[in-house]
Structure formats: structure tokens, C-alpha cells
């Protein structure tokens, strides 16, 4: 039956040339579009692949560019000495800001931590090298209240240059502070505000010259602020004008007055540690102090103290 229908339809078409042409065109069109469609979708697929490849290649190149840019900028940032100084200064400031916050919290009763500032007066001496090595060994930073009356060659070892220690303080990350150039308590230092300030400026210049630019803004009166008597307030005014603050001490091992033995120094030291924030007075010329130092650091740490170098904004620095 199906055969007959086809036959009939076929004969109908065959009999009509017009239909034949239209049929031919239609078939061609269908063929054209279906092949064209296949070809187009193949082409689109190819282009898609190419596009993804290009996209990932671009992404890779872009990342490479970004990395190179970053490297260049970082490299560029530290191409000058000024940039290095600036970066160190920023890190130092941040470090001191954190200690200041800790001080705030301790003083407000919000933290049960404690702080000890170790300070060494009257150096540099040759013995200072040993002090520095002990501090390094315990990863502790301290403050050195320096003078220069002893001269270039070490008072305790004349064959060694002690002024070289100024650079060493900086290199090892300690704070250099001013203890006046002369330390002449009985030699006219406290005669007048001017005589005192002259010795301050002289030491300030000396520190700057020996270190290549270190600016100090912390001072300790030789013999303590009480030595200045009636000049204490006018000197403090002058110091403030020059951007200085000053500090006495709250703890010590008694080495300034001369201790006879390790035990004596140790007893004075341990009985002087009782505040949440302590400023410990030591002298870097004193051999007994140098011997006590490792135990003193351990004692402080075991009693909850964190040991830091002094900085201008600290609460213990009077302004
Ligand atoms: Zn002193």
C-alpha cells in the first residue's frame, strides 16, 4: 500500500517540472543550511576553544605583569638609604606604640602583665660589649644612658676604641639616651641651666656623629634628678622645649654606690622589684652587675615582666 502511495506521489512530481525545480532548490537549501549549521557550530566551538586559550594566556600574562609590577615597586621602595631608614623608623614607632598600649592597660588595671626597662648608665665602656652579648643571648633590648667624658679609648681597656660602641647600640636595636657629655656632678654641671644644657647638647651631637644621625630624646640627670635641686624645674622646661623627656629609676642593684659582692647586688636588686612597671638602674662598667645580669633577666621574666627598651612616649618618661 505504501508503495502505491509513493509511486503516485512520485509520478505527480515527475509530471511537473516546476515542482521538480522547487524540490531541488528546497533540498539544496536544506542541505546548505544543515551543513552550514554544522559547519558554523563547529567553527563557534573552535573559536570558543581559541578564546578560552587566549583568556587563560592573557590571565597568565596579566598575573606576570602584576607580579613584576609588585616586585619593581618593592624593589623601588628600598633603592635609597632614606627609604630603608624610613621603613625601620616606621617599624620602631609601631613597636613603641604597642608597648605604650600595654603600659596603658597595665596602668588601667586591664592587664596583669608587667614591664621592666633595663637601663645602663655612664657607658660606653669596654665591658659594655659583654653586657650587649648577654642582652643578645636573652633576646632583650635595653637603654643606654651614655656619656663621653671617658674619651675615645675605653676607660677599662685603653687599646680599644669605645666610641665604636655607639654604632653597636643601634645595630643591636637598643635605645641610646643622653646622660650629658661630662657627667660632671661636682665639676660644674649643675651650676646653671645653661651649663647643664651645654653638656646635654654636646652629648646629643656626639651621639648623632658617632651613629650617623641617631636622634636621642630621653635623658637621665647624672646622679638622678634630685641632684639638680632648684634647677630641676627650669632644666625640665628647657628639655621639654628641645623635645626631651627624662627618667630616674624605680629599681637597682646598688652598683652606682659600689656593691661588694654578687649576693649584695642580688639582694638589693630582688628587693627593689615590686611595681608593675619598673625602670632598673644598672651601670655597664660594673663587673658584678654584668655577672648578675643573666639571673636578673631570668628573675624578671619568671615574675611576669616583659623587658623593653625605653621610648619617648612611655609613661615613665617625664616631660
Ligand atoms: Zn651616671
Image (cartoon, rainbow, N blue to C red):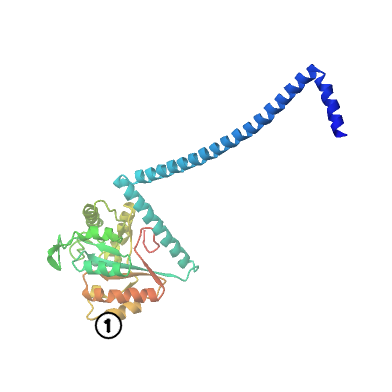
Residue identified by numbered label 1: 263
Please name the residue shown 31% across and 57% down the image. 234
165 over 39 or under it: above or below: below
Image coordinates for residue 164, horizontal then vertical, percent:
19, 59
Instruction: Give residue 316's quadrant in the image.
Output: bottom left
Please name the residue shown 38% across and 55% down the image. 91
Image coordinates for residue 27, horizontal then vertical, percent:
73, 26
Image coordinates for residue 312, horizontal then vertical, percent:
36, 58
**Hey, which residue is sitting farthest right in the picture?**
1
Q: Is residue 237 left or right of residue 15?
A: left
44 over 265 or under it: above or below: above
87 over 44 or under it: above or below: below
Image coordinates for residue 75, horizontal then vertical, percent:
35, 45
Give whichever of 64, 154 is nearer the camera.
64
Residue 191 seen from this side: no
Please name the residue shown 27% across and 67% down the image. 120
Amino acid at each position: 500500500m505504501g508503495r502505491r502511495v509513493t509511486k503516485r506521489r512520485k509520478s505527480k512530481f515527475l509530471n511537473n517540472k516546476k515542482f521538480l525545480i522547487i524540490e531541488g532548490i528546497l533540498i539544496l537549501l536544506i542541505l546548505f543550511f544543515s551543513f552550514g549549521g554544522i559547519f558554523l557550530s563547529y567553527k563557534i566551538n573552535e573559536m570558543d576553544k581559541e578564546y578560552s586559550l587566549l583568556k587563560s594566556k592573557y590571565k597568565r600574562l596579566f598575573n606576570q605583569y602584576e607580579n613584576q609590577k609588585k616586585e619593581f615597586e618593592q624593589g623601588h621602595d628600598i633603592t635609597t638609604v632614606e627609604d630603608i631608614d624610613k621603613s625601620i623608623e616606621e617599624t620602631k614607632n609601631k613597636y613603641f606604640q604597642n608597648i605604650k598600649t600595654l603600659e596603658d592597660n597595665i596602668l588601667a588595671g586591664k592587664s596583669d602583665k608587667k614591664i621592666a626597662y633595663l637601663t645602663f648608665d655612664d657607658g660606653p665602656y669596654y665591658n659594655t660589649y659583654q653586657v650587649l652579648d648577654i642582652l643578645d643571648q636573652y633576646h632583650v633590648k635595653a637603654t643606654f644612658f651614655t656619656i663621653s667624658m671617658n674619651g675615645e679609648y675605653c676607660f677599662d681597656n685603653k687599646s680599644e676604641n669605645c666610641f665604636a660602641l655607639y654604632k653597636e647600640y643601634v645595630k643591636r636595636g637598643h635605645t641610646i639616651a643622653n646622660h650629658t657629655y661630662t657627667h660632671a656632678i661636682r665639676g660644674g654641671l649643675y651650676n646653671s641651666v645653661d651649663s647643664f644644657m651645654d653638656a646635654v647638647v654636646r652629648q646629643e651631637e656626639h651621639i648623632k656623629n658617632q651613629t650617623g644621625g641617631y636622634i636621642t630624646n630621653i635623658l637621665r640627670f647624672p646622679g638622678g634628678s634630685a641632684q639638680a635641686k632648684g634647677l630641676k624645674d627650669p632644666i625640665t622646661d628647657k628639655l621639654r622645649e628641645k623635645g626631651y623627656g627624662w627618667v630616674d629609676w624605680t629599681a637597682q642593684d646598688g652598683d652606682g654606690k659600689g656593691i661588694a659582692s654578687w649576693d649584695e647586688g642580688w639582694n638589693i636588686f630582688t628587693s627593689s622589684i615590686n611595681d608593675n612597671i619598673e625602670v632598673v638602674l644598672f651601670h655597664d662598667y660594673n663587673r658584678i652587675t654584668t655577672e648578675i645580669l643573666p639571673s636578673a633577666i631570668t628573675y624578671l621574666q619568671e615574675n611576669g615582666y616583659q623587658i623593653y627598651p625605653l621610648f619617648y612616649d612611655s609613661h615613665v618618661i617625664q616631660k
